[in-house]
């Protein structure tokens, strides 16, 4: 029997993790990523529960521990920085608001990619622009002009996936939660600690500071709003919204707002993925593109690393006749809208 082939779109957490497991089962894996290189940015994520068990089975638990952020617990503070409550980091696979193992998203991604790089073909700076799902494979057209055929395509692009909309037409995939979060990396000061410090400012607003292992601090500004589309504004518009929303907030808010001029900034609307199906013909969804439970659940990265269902779907899709596959599938040559968000 010939070696089955799979194209995985997305080189963050879910995509490389799936490549690892499919490599172990004899698949030929290719990962395409629209960014020019591996993204090293990102905030703290925890490794606990089922995600911790997957890390053990992948042999990366020690590497994750070596790259830990060093966060020692969680502390709630008032507007004058006075502690209100403090909780130590967990001492088991699942306990504590701060997990026993905390790592930056980009560093976890790097660890998994490094484990797969020798066996997986990584294509950076390119993306899928069309899919033709046929009986004998999926023909993929790339933005760079290449046309290749794979037995299976897996979309692991995140909550606001472009490619998902090519497969599931007229599907309202994202349930917006009316909640926005700005993520920044700011300089560390002598007043910072190794605690995850959190200030709830009222009217649905909060400010947090978290340590990292790079000598900087990861900050967030989060707020509730019934206005949709704020995440589509340009940086200047987003900065204006943040400064107006947090103008009267104390504690670290003035410091974070002052950093908006030059700090790396990522701003997003928090949502949940609600899909009628995670597969369509020879194409499958994985991670946040399929079943994002929203960042505030603390479950997105853990569920992204758990991919046994997708592995089984890949195997079934490759081996069974089309008449046994789901009826809801992509039509030939569906092209992504050029300005649709990922």
Image (cartoon, grey):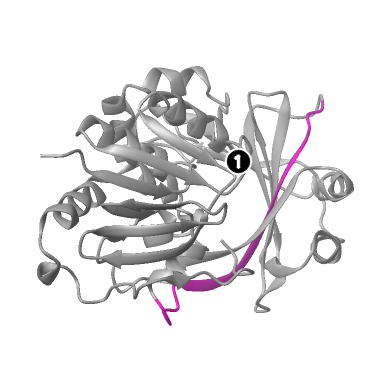
State whether residue 337 is above or below residue 108. Answer: below
In the displayed structure image, the side of residue 181 where residue 258 appears, left or right: right
Is 91 left, or right, of 239 in this rendering?
left
Nearer-the-camera pick, 257 or 318: 318
**In the displayed structure image, the side of residue 308 where residue 257 appears, left or right:** right
Q: Can I make out residue 48 in this image?
A: yes
The x, y position of residue 92, in whole percent, is 35, 29
- The residue sitting at 28% across, 69% down in the picture is 277
Position of 304 relative to 122 (above/below): below
Near-viewer residue (129 or 285): 129
Residue 29 location, x and y as percent?
Answer: 33, 39
Quadrant in the picture for the N terminus: top left
- Percent of width and height locating residue 329: 28, 73
Q: Classify mark 1: residues with Cα within 10 Å, few (<14), some (14-19) or many (20+).
A: many
Quarter of the picture containing the C terminus is bottom right
- Range drawn in magenta: 169-189
Q: Which residue is mark 1?
A: 43
Specify the principal SS of the magenta part: strand
Was residue 290 drawn as part of the magenta stretch in this picture? no
- Residue 296 in picture, x, y percent from top left: 51, 55
The residue at the point 65 percent across, 63 percent down is: 180
Secondary element type, mark 1: loop
Report the residue at 66% width, 66% height from top: 204
Q: Count up the numbered dots.
A: 1
- Does 182 lie within the magenta span? yes
Can residue 203 be spotted in the picture?
A: no
Picture quadrant of residue 184: top right
Which of 183/28 is in front?
28
**273 vs 118: above or below:** below
Q: Residue at x 71, y 34 (%)?
A: 217
Describe residue 246's horizontal placement relative to residue 170 as left or right: right
């Amino acid at each position: 029997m010939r070696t089955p082939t799979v194209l995985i779109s997305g080189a963050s957490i879910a995509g490389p993790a799936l490549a690892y497991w499919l490599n172990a089962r004899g698949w030929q894996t290719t990962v395409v990523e629209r960014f020019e290189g591996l993204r090293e940015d990102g905030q703290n994520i925890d490794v606990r529960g089922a995600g911790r068990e997957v890390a053990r089975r992948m042999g990366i638990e020690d590497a994750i521990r070596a790259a830990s952020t060093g966060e020692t617990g969680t502390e709630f503070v008032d507007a004058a920085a006075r502690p209100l409550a403090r909780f130590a980091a967990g001492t088991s696979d699942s306990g504590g608001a701060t997990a026993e193992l905390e790592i930056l998203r980009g560093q976890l991604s790097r660890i998994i990619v490094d484990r797969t790089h020798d066996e997986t073909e990584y294509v950076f700076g390119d993306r899928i622009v069309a899919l033709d799902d046929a009986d004998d494979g999926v023909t993929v057209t790339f933005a760079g002009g290449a046309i290749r055929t794979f037995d299976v395509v897996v979309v692991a692009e995140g909550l606001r996936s472009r490619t998902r909309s090519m497969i599931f037409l007229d599907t309202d995939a994202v349930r917006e939660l009316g909640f926005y979060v700005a993520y920044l990396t700011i300089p560390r000061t002598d007043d910072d600690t190794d605690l995850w410090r959190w200030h709830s400012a009222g009217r649905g607003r909060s400010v947090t500071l978290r340590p990292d292992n790079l000598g900087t601090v990861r900050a967030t500004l989060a707020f509730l709003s019934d206005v949709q589309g704020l995440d589509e504004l340009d940086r200047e518009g987003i900065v204006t919204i943040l400064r107006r929303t947090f103008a009267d907030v104390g504690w670290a808010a003035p410091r974070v707002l002052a950093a908006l001029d030059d700090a790396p900034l990522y701003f997003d609307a928090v949502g949940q993925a609600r899909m009628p199906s995670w597969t369509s013909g020879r194409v499958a969804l994985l991670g946040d593109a399929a079943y994002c439970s929203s960042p505030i659940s603390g479950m997105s990265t853990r569920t992204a690393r758990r991919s046994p269902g997708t592995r089984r779907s890949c195997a079934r899709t490759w081996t069974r006749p089309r008449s046994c596959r789901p009826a809801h599938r992509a039509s030939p040559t569906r092209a992504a809208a050029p300005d649709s968000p990922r």
